[in-house]
Amino acid sequence: MRLRHWFSAFPLTGALALGCTPSIVIDAPDIEVTQPDLQFPATPANVAPGTTASAIYTLNTSRLGAAGSPDAGTYKSIQRLQVTRVALNAKTGIEDFSFLNHLTVTATNPASTYLPNPPVVPIVDYQASDVAAGASLALPVDPPVDMLPLWASTRLRLTITAAGNLPTVAWTADVVFSLSLRMTQ
Amino acid sequence: MGNVNSVLRLFFQVPSWMSGYVQQAGYSYYNAHLGIEFGRHNITGFIHLGGSYVNATVRAPNPVTVPQPTGSTGSPAQVLLGQDASVRAFTISAKLGLIVFFGGPS
């Protein structure tokens, strides 16, 4: 098998030896980025309606082709990087997401937060009537949200804000972002 | 299928951030070449030039852990390919070789 690989790749070796750069298209329709055990704070009982609980975390995007990673120029070769779905899976403190009335997910570049109006990309704006909530909450993002404007940095700050009949104990959830990537080289 | 990072790196400039996701791969390829062959007696040399098209499928069944940014707390993120990724490559290619015929009239 190893011998077969060697011989079958021989033409490519020749091309590279001649200094020719192959044209490459990479298409990954579903890259699942899971942030486990995202912590939401407890909400005191009898709080005013409209009170929210937020979880903020920073994603290291250098392993996802962001500029600033050791592979210089990778960011420029990405032609499509979109969020197509966000899913939450209940872990501790809650059994399901039936308490949610409203959930938003936004992304921003941490380096831009010093600006008066830092650019914020809204990803999800979920209303309880949109999707049936169980122990898992799958939220299709339609149309997909373009993340390329935020990919110049190696960090991405994601904010998940929940509103509704919030738990009085701290709770955790796994959050899964589905990305669709197309890049050329 | 198998761990093919070393094979891919041999022929393509696979970005280092991407290598963790290339855990298994299968590929098919097509060559279209024109060339000349020349020889004497039972030895033939050849030079072929043309193009090669490679169509590969990449799988990452095992999650890749993304290190947390400096100063961040909490569990690190995990990344996997929910669906197979496809890689299509086209390149100019060349083939040089020598054929030695055994037996028969010399």
Image (cartoon, coloured by chain):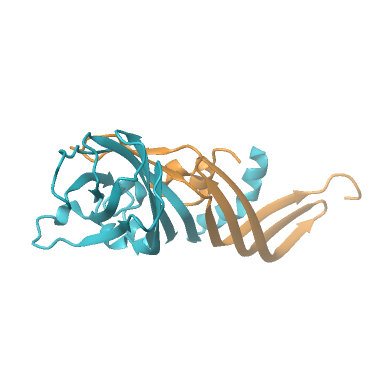
Chain colours: A cyan, B orange
Count of marks placed on residues: 0
Instruction: Please state the horizontal and vertical placement of residue A112, each as a whole percent of the image.
Output: 15, 57
Q: Nearer the viewer, residue A72 or B72?
A: B72
B102 shown above or below B87: above
Residue B85 appears at what percent x and percent y? 51, 52
Q: Quick check: A128 left or right of B42?
A: left
x 60%, y 61%: residue: B53
> Would you place residue A134 above or below residue A22 in this image?
above
Picture quadrant where residue A67 is located: bottom left
Q: Relative to the observer, which residue lies in front, B59 or A94?
A: A94
- Residue B52 quadrant: bottom right
Going 57% across and 53% down the picture, which residue do you hit?
Answer: B56
Visible in this render: residue A93? yes
State the quadrant of the N terminus of chain B: top right
Q: Position of residue A133 (x, y in %)?
A: 39, 48
Which residue reaches farthest right?
A: B105
Q: Is residue A39 left or right of residue B51?
A: left
Looking at the image, the residue that sits furthest to the front is: A46
Q: Residue at x 77, y 57 (%)?
A: B39
- Tell me where residue A107 appears, x and y as whole percent: 25, 55
The answer to whether residue A102 is left or right of residue A43 is right
Q: Is residue B67 visible?
A: no
Q: Is residue A172 depicted above or below B101 in this figure?
A: above
Left or right of B1 in this view: A44? left
Q: Residue at x 68, y 53 (%)?
A: B97
